[in-house]
Amino acid sequence: MNDNMMAVFLNGIAQLEYDRDKLMPDHQAAYLDKMDAKMDAGILLGGETIKNPDQNQRTQFAAANLASALHSADESMAAAMCSYLAIRLPELKQVKIDDNEGEVTIELIFDEEYRKQVAVEFTGLH
């Protein structure tokens, strides 16, 4: 069991896993720093522009972009947002995104370890 795992769920199904024990390549770390620098200039959150967002606002922004990337199957953006959340929030265990006919809710879980989903095959049932 790896305590350094973070998982992203969409409608209850694991979409992405991030293992904090794996070394992040330099170019990815630089990309996260670039993301923070861009956010310093301001972000659009809930229809309003926020200049110099705090960590909580940055987190909301990244989580919303993660949900959007999953919805549009933008794998590289989803991976970048997943990495951002995992690295910037080392205590984060799970991101639960629910999309109910366009009504999206995002929940960040800090106190519940992620357990890998395993397919169970039933054999010999009569």
Image: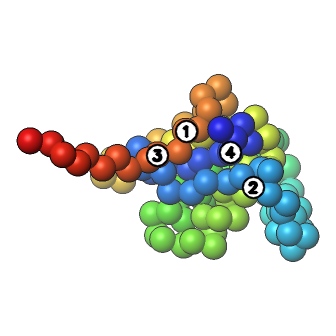
Q: Secondary structure at mark 4?
A: strand
**Label 3, label 4: how many angstroms apart (C-alpha)?**
13 Å
Image side of residue 116 versus residue 85, left or right: left
**Of marks 2 and 4, which one's residue comes earlier in the chain?**
4
Observer-nearest of 19 and 104 = 19
Which of discs 2 and 4 lies nearer the camera? The answer is: 4
Is mark 1 in CB contact (under 8 Å) with mark 3?
yes
Q: How far is disc 2 from disc 3 in space, using C-alphas?
A: 23 Å
Q: Position of residue 39 (x, y in %)?
A: 80, 58
Q: Marks 4 and 2: in contact by CB < 8 Å?
A: no
User: Where residue 84 is drawn, which disc sits there?
Assistant: 2
Q: Is residue 45 visible in the rendered structure shown here? A: no
Residue ID for mark 4: 5
Task: Point out which mark residue 115 bears.
Answer: 1
Name the mark nearer the viewer: 2 or 3.
3
Type of amino acid at the residue the image marks with label 4 = Met
Give the camera-side residue of 53 and 73.
Answer: 73
User: Which of the two residues, 45 or 105, is positioned nearer the viewer here?
Assistant: 105
Residue 1 in which image quadrant: top right
Check the image and report above or below for 33 versus 85.
below
Read off the residue under disc 3. Answer: 117
Q: Amino acid at mark 2?
A: Tyr
